[in-house]
Amino acid sequence: MSHPSAVPGPQPVQIPERAHAVGPGWRQVLDRLHGQVHASAPGYHLVGLTEIGGCVSRWRTRMATSVR
């Protein structure tokens, strides 16, 4: 039997793979945000992307654990 930590989890994603989670009005903002974050931390992983009265994104890099 495999150890639980050996079970593969969800694959890391970046903003373009989850942009559909918010309204179409956020697309240009998210594209620009992805370009800026990717330029300084190309290996960032999106932790969450939601729209609740505004757009909230959270991601992880080696430089920072969470950015809003």
Image (cartoon, helix red, strand yellow):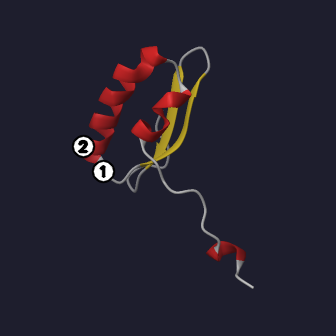
The residue tagged with tag 2: helix, strand or loop?
helix
Q: Amino acid at mark 1?
A: Pro
The residue tagged with tag 1: helix, strand or loop?
loop
Disc 2 from disc 1: Cα separation: 6 Å
Residue at (34, 21) in percent of width and height: 28
In the rendered view, does 31 fall on the left or right side of 26?
left
Looking at the image, residue 47 lies above or below residue 53: below
Residue 39 locus on image (x, y percent): 24, 43
Residue 66 locus on image (x, y percent): 50, 43
- Residue identifier under label 2: 39
Q: Quadrant of the N terminus?
A: bottom right
- Residue identifier under label 1: 42
Residue at (43, 19) in percent of width and height: 26
Looking at the image, residue 20 lies above or below residue 44: above
In the rendered view, does 65 fall on the left or right side of 2?
left
Is the Cβ of the residue at disc 2 closer than 8 Å to that at disc 1?
yes
How many labels, in total? 2
Residue 22 locus on image (x, y percent): 53, 24
Q: Amino acid at mark 2?
A: Ala
Residue 57 locus on image (x, y percent): 50, 33
> Mark 2 packing: few (<14 Cα in 10 Å), some, or many (20+)?
few
Residue at (32, 40) in percent of width and height: 37
Based on the displayed image, in which of its 4 quarters is residue 15 positioned? top left
Q: Nearer the viewer, residue 6 or 20?
A: 20
In the rendered view, does 68 fall on the left or right side of 28?
right
